[in-house]
Amino acid sequence: MSLTNQDLRKAGLKVTLPRIKILELLESAEMHHMSAEEVYKALIGQGEDVGLATVYRVLTQFEQAGIVERHNFENNLSVFEITQEEHHDHLVCDGCGKIIEFHNEIIEEEQLKVAKEHGFKLSGHSLVLYGICNNKECQDNAR
């Protein structure tokens, strides 16, 4: 999903260079989930003249406009990702902070079943599984 300047305008946001650069970075990043600090460092690494406060402000505006989603994981880390059409859940490594997206239809069905059993009509949900990834350093430190 590639967002355009017109998408920014539809969201009620002016098209500014910092907004365009942050949007391009989030869309092209190998890491789908980036903290504001990671976005800032990546932009500085690209030679962009942008302040950390600007990055926070733009990400918050993007979140309010529905362009990005903020995830607050237990390691006190807020990360942002471009809002996706398909729902997914997350695995988070307690060692290195690696985040893996996954979708499992059986889990989705069970959640609906549990909600129905308790008389709930779901408006949404968030599932985050924590553990240790297969990185040798994480595995060694977990022992």
Image (cartoon, rainbow, N blue to C red):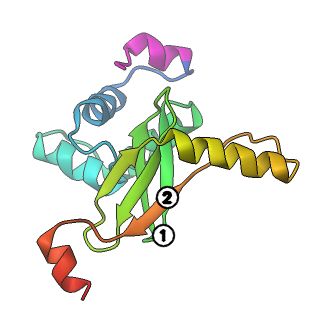
User: Is residue 98 depicted above or below 24 in this figure?
Assistant: below
Q: CA distance from mark 1 to mark 2?
A: 9 Å
The type of residue carrying mark 1 is Glu
* Residue 16 - label: none
Q: Residues within 10 Å of mark 1 (few under 14, many from 20)?
A: few
Looking at the rendered image, the quarter that the N terminus falls into is top left
Image spot of residue 38 (x, y percent):
26, 53
User: Is residue 10 depicted above or below 36 in this figure?
Assistant: above
Residue at figure coordinates x 19%, y 46% from the top left: 42
**Of 117 and 120, the residue lying toward us:** 117
**Of 99 and 12, the residue lying toward us:** 99
Magenta region includes residue 85 = no
Residue 27 located left or right of residue 30:
right
Question: Which quadrant of the figure has residue 46?
Answer: top left
* Residue 128 - label: 2
The type of residue carrying mark 2 is Val
Q: Please give the residue where the numbered disc 1 appears in the rendered image.
A: 74
Residue at figure coordinates x 45%, y 70% from the top left: 76
Under circle 1, the secondary element is: loop
- Look at the numbered discs 1 and 2 and tell me whether their residues touch, using CB distance below 8 Å: yes
Q: Residue furthest bottom?
A: 143
**Of 122 and 57, the residue lying toward us:** 122
Question: Which quadrant of the figure has residue 78?
Answer: bottom left
Residue at figure coordinates x 44%, y 10% from the top left: 6
State the extent of the magenta-drawn residues as a range.
1-10
